Amino acid sequence: MATAQALEGHLVLRASIVFLFFANPIVALAEMHVVIVKGLGGSETYESQFTEQVVAITTASRSVTDSEHVTTLVENQARKEHIVEHLNVLAEQLDSSDQLVIYLIGHGSYDGYEYKFNVPGPDITGEQLHALLQEIPATKFLVNTSSASGAIERLFESDDTTMVLATRSGVERHATRFGQFFAESLSSENADIDKNRRISGQEAFSFADRQVKQYFEQNNSLATEHAVLRAKGFESVTLSMLDQTQAAASSSVRSALEQQKDSLNKDIESLKTNRSSYDESEYQRLLLQKLIELARVEEKIEQGVTE
Amino acid sequence: MSWHNSFVCVLVAVGTLLVAQPTYPRSIHYGAVNNDQVEACDRLSWKGKRAEAMNCYQDVLADRSAPNSALAEASWALKDVQRANDYFRSALKDNPGDLDVKARWGDLFSSTHQDAEAMAIYQEVLQQKPNHGFALVGAARLLASGFESSATDFLAKVPEREGAAIPAALITAWINLENGDVGSAKRELNKAEAMATDGEWPLLDVYALRAAADLLGNTRADWTEKALEINPRFGEIYSVPAHFYVITRRYREAIALYQKAVKLDPNLTVAHRELGINLLRDNRVSEARYHLELAYTQDPFSPISVNTLRLLDSFKHFDTIGYQPEDPTLVPMTLRLHEDESAVLSPYTKELAEQAMLVFRERYGFRLKEPIVIEMYPDHADFAVRTAGMPGLGILGAAFGYLVAMDSPSARPVEQFQWGTTLWHELAHIYTLEATNHLVPRWFSEGASVFEEWRSGPNPGVRISMSVLQAIKDGKMLSVAELDEGFIRPTYPQQVIVSYMQAGLICDFINQNYPDGLKNMLKAFAEGQSTENAITQVLDLSISAFDKQFNEYVEQNFGAVFEQFEHWHDAKKAMTELLAKQDWEAVQTKARELIAITPNYVEPDSPYLALSLAQSSLEQSDEALETLLEYWRKGGYHPSSLMRLAKALEERGDKNQAINVLNTLHLVDPFDESSHAMLGELYLDVAEPVQALREFQVAMALSPHDQATAHYRVGQAYFKMGDTERAQSALIKALEVAPNFRPAQKLLLKVVSQPTS
């Protein structure tokens, strides 16, 4: 019930976003843009699951970028012509400094020749998606959680789009679980490996990939999907903020303490990278020293105290 | 050793004799072979004159006038079974209607572990001649070796005045002895001896079984001496009785006899193999490997030897963990757990074993005298090989005395297997076996274990499926005096499980009505008393009076269920349909009807679960919680339902009860990291940091995705325990993964501000 209500509210908002988008072309922004497409569920169960995922992803996306940069295409808005239209507009609006994250939530199919993402009306093919994305100059991240999504990997071979695919090939045709876990990761404390209160693309993928594997192991069943992460840079994109107030503070306040914090984080990273060049006890001593320093700096930031 | 590939060969053998060098002996054939030349050689062999016999068989092979069937027998005796197979084929090509030769061909397949092919050949013979004695005997032997009760159907058809009547009587005696019916066995042996004497066959097989009958009946005669007078190298005079020690679970006595058998006849492959397997049951791994490798060398295609050696190879992936309980009066234990699971399973296994030792010592008045060994196998096939040498075993655990082997919780779907309860069951066996020097009848040992599961186990509750109750209602229970047969040679598909439940109920009945009855029964068994004598002596009842009283107890406890079986099934069906329609009000009504009839029914399709689901769906969360709580109290173990219950209890603030529920959950599904983390947090909340640490360490062993939090939790537990040094170490690990992890940073600052512990 809660989910349905959430989606209802979201749909209203989505409609206004789409309206605003078409009515007021936005000038180029060096920011993150997110497009979420919900395909056909085909049954009540999948409709409900996909809707939950779309709501979770939309909420998460709004935590990392302005709401007007988050577009959710569901039901008739998810028809091929609208997707094409929207991506074409983005191709005009965005430049190479922007980031674009596209989520495809739904079922896919592959007949041995052609991948199709199932939407109301004619499906959109893998080739069509590829062609549309090629026209967009931004740094692109495509998260395709559909069945058979692995079929599109070859289309992007010479492309720099970072892709997360729920299956490793087009022959993995069963409805996937990956999307559910990926959406879950965006609000999960467990997915936040480095505890920076942000879920990076890499963290979301790792979490979902592991959950899928566990699902099949725990059910003693043969895995019917194997997720794929193609290309690099997914760790650099933040898909969700777990704590927006902190994010706001850290993005707006550039105090000396924060510089000190960044510097200490770099020191710790460097120490970890060069661990083999230290005696283990020396490494532990230095690590502890840096961790304590960092903890004290964080404490001061939290308390709003400056030296 | 290359037993790995050989195993595959045995499995794929279809229709073609693949065995190169079997050493399974050509036993005395009692007229199945009709060739004077071969029989003359056989008689030398049966007297232990091996060299002379081998020369004799060679002479047969050199005789160009010898028929193909004789050449087949000679080749077989000389261990060239491939050639024997070729000669049998030629013989049957020349004379397809020679059913005697065809039956012997079946025997050749039987002797080389190709049971399905052998049975197909016997069936072919029997289609043409339904009362062919040796084909009937061959088929019965195969069935009897698998404890199939249908063996007796074949034996009953063997014509009385033919040579085949002798092995038929011997197999019948064998079956009787396996059933513990020494009197009937002796009568069959008398028949066999008379017929064998008339036919001038050596009495070796008769003497071996008489020795076995002596062993079971606690009598003694000079059968060994008589057999060795005939054949001084007749190792079977020891290995045959040894088999009956094995099936009565007296493994150490069996080992001693097998050792004598291989000393007398170092080529007695079966004895080497069985010796190896039984040494393993006594945890004597190196000695076991030695004899199994010898058996493999002599017969590389025995699936039992190959499987067991492969299992021994896999032991390198198992951790061996020694543990001495804090209570010095308890014996030490050794755990053999798979390296991927040992860190998770060992804390619970140790705790359960310690608890079990305390409970059972009190109940049965017996203190263990040796360390115990507990093995758990993540692959059920490995456990089956460990237990029976072959995959395909339908049990969960086995106790061989001080050694317990069982499926690990990962061997089965979590919703079907309460590993903690199974361990409890097997540990109870150690007491009933060792307190009686393994003389306890099977029904009592199994019954006591089931009873302990229900009454003292980690998840108590009388769990009997409706199909078993139906069988009980239908009068399928046996008299207590015959109950062992229900385990060993079941006559209907469900009989083994019905026998388990009946035995459990009998022990419950004794415990309720006769103070110290179980303890005193065990003492009587230790003195070698039969079931009948023990019941008379301890309970002062005849068997018939006991059966009568027990049936009254069953009626008292389950009579109401029996009367409403039809109603129960109708209501269950209706409830299932209503669940599909999500008609929650109606589901509640039906579920309550079912619960009223069977309040203790907590199997995976329990009405409690349906009721709880209906209540949740109608947003009656308090009622749903109470229903699940009742389900759990009755012994319900459905993992996701228990997790739901624990979360609801935690939300309600009932942390101690949530802890209890999670502890039950871990004895069903110990591999869910989140439930360990949750339990650890609850333990911290109720100020039990030592228990919390155990849970956090188990969670850590499950390689959690969120390593930083997992280390932080360990640090928290150490900090609460006052161990700041270990707390600091854990926190460094947490922050090494996630340097900005605020809770860990805060705790680290607290830790470093305190003096080192």
Image (tube, rainbow, N blue to C red):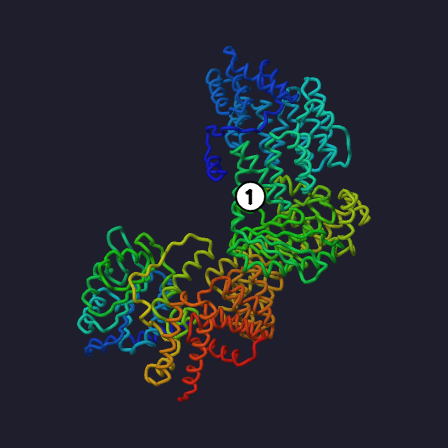
**Left or right placement of residue A25 versus residue B376 in this view:** left
Question: Badge 1, how many Cα within 10 Å: few under 14, some, many 20+?
Answer: many
Callout count: 1
Q: Nearer the viewer, residue B577 or B257?
A: B257
Within the image, what quadrant is residue B532 found in?
top right
Query: What x and y, as percent, mark residue B543?
Result: 77, 44
Q: Nearer the viewer, residue A19 or A293?
A: A293
State the residue position of label 1.
Answer: B385
Quadrant of the image for the C terminus of chain B? bottom right
From this view, report whether residue B17 is shown above or below residue B505.
above
Residue type for callout 1: Val
Q: In this rendering, would B554 be left or right of B1? A: right
Q: Residue furthest top?
A: B65
Q: What chain letter is assigned to the residue under label 1?
A: B
Q: Foreground: B749 or B276?
A: B749
Q: Is residue A247 visible?
A: yes
Residue B281 placement: quadrant: top right
Residue B564 showing in the rendered view:
no
Height in image: B647 above or below B279?
below
Q: Nearer the viewer, residue B516 or B254?
A: B254
Residue B320 higher or lower than B7, as above or below: below
Task: Answer with the quarter of the image where residue B484 lies.
Answer: top right
- Give the percent coordinates (x, y) of residue B734: 46, 71
Q: Position of residue B555 (x, y in %)?
A: 70, 53
At 71% from the left and 48% from the top, the residue drawn is: B434
Q: Secondary structure at mark 1?
A: helix
Residue B542 in the image: x percent, y percent? 80, 45
